[in-house]
Image (tube, rainbow, N blue to C red):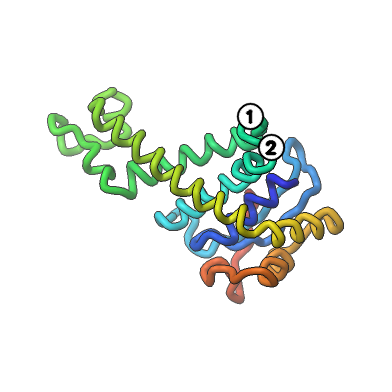
Amino acid sequence: MLHLTKCCFCRTLTPGHDPVQKVTSIPRGQARGLTWFIPLDDPSLISRQQLFARIVGGLGGRTDEEIIFGEPEVTTGAAGDLQQITGLAKQMVVGLSDIGPWSLMDSGAQSGDVIMRMMARNSMSEKLTDDIDTAVKRLSDEAYEIALSQIRNNQEAMDNIVEVLLEKETLSGDEFRAILSEFMEIPVKNRVPPAMPAALPT
C-alpha cells in the first residue's frame, strides 16, 4: 500500500497529471491496490508535460522504497514501474524532443520511410542510438530527483494519507486531495473542475 500511495502522491503534485478519482488499498487480482484517474484531455493526444508527469509519478514508489529500505531492498513492484517509465521516456525522446522523429530518418532512405520501418531494418546509426539512450537516462534522472524531493519533503502529508487509507481502505479523489491540501498547494492543473468525464483505472 505504501508503494501505491507514494505513486499517487507524486502524480498529484506533478503539474500535468490527470487528477485522482479514487484510490483503494483493497487487493484486486494480482494488484495490491488500484488508483483511478480522471482524463482531463483527449487520451489519444498526450503532451510532453503529461508524459513527464507520469514518469515522475511512476517513480514515487521506487524512491520511497529506496529511502526507507535502501537500494538493495527495492522490490519487484518498483522494478515493474521502471519498465513502464523507460517506455514513456523513450516515447518522449523519439517523438517530443530535439532527437524527434525527423532526425531518426535515414538520409539514404526514401522520403516515405518512417521511424518504425527504419528501426525494424536496424538502419539507425550507433551514435543516434547512444544519443537516444543518453536522453532517456537524463530524462529519467530528472524525474527521479523530482520524485525524491517530493517524498523527502512531504513525509507528514504522506503519513496522514497512509493512516486514513489504512482505516477507510478506499478514498475518493476529493478526500485524497483534501488531506494533501492541509499540508501543501496542489497544482491547478491537477485539481478537478466541474463536469468531469468518466474516470479511467490505472
Which residue, as the protein is rendered here, is positioned at the far top? 122
Task: Report x, y in % for residue 12.
Answer: 59, 60
Residue at horizontal 56 percent and vertical 66 percent from the top: 190
In the drawing, does residue 37 fall left or right of residue 109?
A: right
Residue 117 in view: no
The local secondary structure at tag 1 comes to helix
The local secondary structure at tag 2 comes to helix
From mark 1 to mark 2, how far is it between C-alphas?
Answer: 8 Å
Q: Which residue is under mark 2?
A: 69
73 w.r.t. 23: above or below: above
Residue at horizontal 32 percent and vertical 25 percent from the top: 120
Give, as a three-letter code, the residue at label 2.
Phe
Which residue, as the protein is rendered here, is positioned at the far left? 108
Picture quadrant where residue 141 is located: top left
Residue 154 in view: yes
Give, as a three-letter code, the residue at label 1.
Pro
8 w.r.t. 133: above or below: below
Picture quadrant where residue 156 is located: bottom right
Of 200 and 177, nearer the camera is 177
Task: Report x, y in % for residue 185.
Answer: 59, 71
Q: Which residue is under mark 1?
A: 72
10 Å crowding of disc 1: few (<14), some (14-19), many (20+)? few
135 w.r.t. 129: above or below: below
In the drawing, does residue 128 fall left or right of residue 139?
A: left
Of 161 and 25, nearer the camera is 161
In the drawing, does residue 198 fall left or right of residue 101?
A: right
Residues under numbered marks 1 and 2 in contact, where contact means CB atoms less than 8 Å apart: yes
Residue at horizontal 69 percent and vertical 52 percent from the top: 5
Residue at horizontal 74 percent and vertical 35 percent from the top: 30
